[in-house]
């Protein structure tokens, strides 16, 4: 069915044509009924007239007490031209017929008017060709005591005129019907306009299009009032919806910048809203990297929370019973976990890193001490060697060895000052960094090529599993520095004959989730929380011997933070160390 056809047969037209169809059928039946009644009435008038003639003839016969053989002397009593009179006995034999010279059939008992008269006393036949005369007549018969008197008028133009139906009532009925149809059309047209506005209103709402029709309906009836109320209700709902969207955006923005991990789920444990910290913390607690948020309910450490949720959804609980708290120590961190079940059986899980504030205090207190200590060590070494060369008699070979050590310490001091400068620049001027489109997979490939000789020397296999289509908008130098420091750390401290795997294991609307893992010797869980502290070393002597400044992972953390992400470390399930971090997508 074409669109134009559907538009033509709209609801108001369907209503109009259906009702008008029924109305026309009713008018037609009424006219037909009235026509038939009028026809019967005209016939009845003519029949009554002939019945009167029949009565006159019978009265005349009775007054003269004539027997049936002498009817011809009295048959012409009614003075009507061409009136034919016939007298018939009850056996159907014609006793008399006023039409002279006619051949009269033997029996008239089966004639319609005679048969009716014999049964009910009276009868007529509107138009029948006489076998006797060969003329069409209107017959009327009346039964009396010993015979039937039948009169007949030729079906002339005069008789036809007397039987003609008065057509005025038909034309009057048609005029009234057309007037009513016009009135009904105007009413349905008004109804159709209101329905069309409601239909357009509904279609615009369905397609989220602006609704520019006037709020006041042109119809003043109940439907117009309903239409107006519906539009006003929608307007209020639309305004409320916009306000809710604004509040929702505020809530999402607050959750994403919150210092606690928060996840909201429906009663079927499907994700409604989770923030970045929730994913970070659950991945630290978990022994494997989760590709979907729903996998949190499979973490062994969070099983008490899952059991509490299942229990709370199966039975009605009091207000205090719908909240639980749990403390978990994992990967050198202490997490406080709270779960709240709402009335609709949806629930919220919040994860707080309760060690974070203490770490910040310790970091600030130790930072000044560490900087002073780290600067003091190479300066003291250089000063001691130089004093020995200046104030003591040292042979040239030993003097050269002392100068070489001075040079190494000066290089270490240079690297230290450079790293401090980088951290200071990130802390104080992060918003002034130049941003561009960065291909993460290409950055990792570049770093692997640059350190290929060191990898080959230590028999390390480095694998890049990051897809080629992952790009972010960021500072290339900082992104490079983050991945390079992670790579250098694994090469320097993880050991030999190991594997390094870089992967992007998940993404959502806002972030890419990365994993940098090695299968080396790893670190103790008590060190995991402090790896990103400035100047923190697991083995201080070994780190200095390898030329580290103790700021590499601090630079990594700050670079990730500048790009809208978070980073954490945990023990790799297969042995070694794994860093999990996020980078914000380019929007």
Image: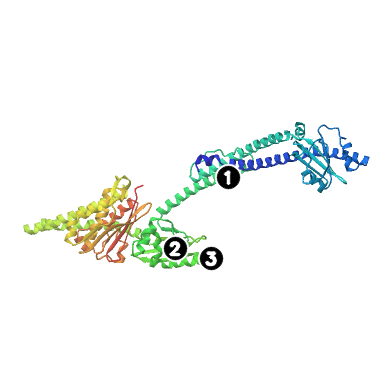
Residue 153, percent across and down? 79, 35
Position of residue 240 in the picture relative to residue 222 (left or right):
left
In this view, the mark in front (3 or 1):
1
Mark number displayed over residue 507: none
Residue 181, percent across and down? 65, 37
Q: What crowding class fits label 1: few (fewer than 14 Cα within 10 Å), some (14-19), or many (20 or more)? A: some
Residue 242, percent across and down? 49, 46
Alpha-carbon span between mark 1 and mark 2: 44 Å
From this view, report whether residue 308 is shown above or below residue 182: below
Position of residue 383 in the picture relative to residue 31 (left or right):
left
- Classify mark 3: helix, strand or loop: loop
Query: First in sequence: mark 3 or mark 2?
Result: 3
* Residue at which label 1 appears: 230
* Residue at which label 3 appears: 318
Q: What crowding class fits label 3: few (fewer than 14 Cα within 10 Å), some (14-19), or many (20 or more)? A: few
Alpha-carbon span between mark 3 and mark 1: 40 Å
Alpha-carbon span between mark 3 and mark 2: 17 Å
- Classify mark 1: helix, strand or loop: helix
């Amino acid at each position: 069915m074409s669109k134009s056809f559907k538009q033509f047969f709209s609801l108001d037209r369907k209503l109009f044509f259906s009702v008008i169809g029924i109305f026309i059928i009713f008018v037609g039946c009424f006219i037909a009924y009235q026509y038939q009644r009028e026809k019967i009435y005209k016939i009845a008038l003519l029949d009554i007239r002939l019945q009167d003639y029949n009565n006159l003839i019978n009265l005349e016969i009775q007054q003269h007490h004539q027997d049936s053989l002498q009817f011809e002397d009295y048959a012409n009593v009614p003075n009507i031209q061409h009136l034919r009179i016939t007298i018939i006995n009850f056996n159907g034999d014609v006793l008399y017929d006023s039409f002279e010279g006619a051949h009269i059939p033997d029996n008239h008992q089966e004639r319609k008017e005679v048969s009716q008269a014999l049964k009910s006393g009276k009868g007529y036949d509107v138009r029948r060709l006489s076998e006797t005369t060969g003329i069409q007549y209107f017959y009327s018969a009346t039964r009396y005591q010993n015979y039937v008197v039948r009169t007949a008028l030729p079906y002339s133009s005069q008789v036809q005129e007397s039987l003609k139906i008065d057509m005025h009532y038909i034309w009057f009925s048609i005029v009234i019907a057309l007037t009513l149809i016009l009135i009904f059309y105007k009413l349905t047209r008004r109804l159709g306009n209101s329905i069309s506005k409601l239909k357009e209103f509904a279609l615009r709402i369905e397609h989220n299009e602006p609704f520019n029709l006037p709020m006041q309906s042109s119809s003043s009836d109940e439907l117009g009032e309903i239409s107006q109320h519906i539009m006003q209700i929608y307007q209020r709902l639309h305004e409320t919806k916009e306000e809710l969207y604004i509040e929702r955006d505020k809530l999402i923005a607050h959750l994403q910048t919150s210092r606690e991990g928060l996840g909201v789920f429906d009663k079927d444990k499907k994700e409604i809203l989770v923030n970045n910290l929730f994913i970070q913390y659950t991945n630290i607690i978990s022994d494997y990297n989760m590709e979907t948020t729903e996998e949190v309910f499979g973490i062994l450490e969070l099983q008490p929370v899952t059991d509490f949720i299942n229990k709370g959804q199966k039975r009605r609980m009091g207000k205090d019973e719908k909240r639980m708290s749990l403390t978990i120590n994992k990967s050198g961190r202490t997490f406080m976990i709270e779960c709240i079940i709402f009335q609709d059986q949806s629930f919220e899980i919040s994860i707080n890193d309760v060690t974070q504030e203490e770490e910040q205090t310790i970091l600030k207190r130790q930072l000044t001490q560490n900087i002073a200590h780290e600067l003091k060590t190479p300066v003291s070494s250089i000063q001691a060697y130089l004093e020995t060369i200046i104030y003591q008699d040292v042979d040239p070979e030993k003097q050269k060895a002392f100068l070489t050590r001075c040079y190494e310490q000066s290089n270490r001091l240079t690297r230290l000052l450079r790293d401090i400068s980088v951290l200071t620049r990130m802390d104080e001027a992060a918003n002034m960094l130049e941003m561009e489109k960065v291909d993460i997979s290409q950055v990792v490939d570049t770093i692997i090529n640059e350190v290929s000789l060191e990898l080959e020397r230590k028999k390390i296999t480095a694998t890049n599993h990051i897809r080629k289509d992952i790009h972010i908008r960021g500072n290339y130098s900082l992104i490079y520095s983050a991945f390079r420091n992670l790579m250098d750390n694994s090469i320097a401290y993880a050991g030999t004959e190991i594997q390094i795997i870089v992967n992007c294991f998940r993404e959502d609307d806002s972030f890419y989730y990365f994993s940098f893992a090695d299968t080396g010797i790893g670190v103790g869980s008590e060190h995991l929380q402090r790896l990103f502290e400035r100047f923190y070393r697991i083995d201080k002597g070994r780190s200095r011997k390898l030329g580290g400044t103790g700021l590499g992972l601090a630079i990594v953390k700050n670079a990730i933070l500048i790009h809208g992400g978070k980073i954490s470390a945990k023990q790799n399930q297969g042995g070694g160390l794994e860093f999990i971090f996020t980078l914000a997508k380019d929007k």
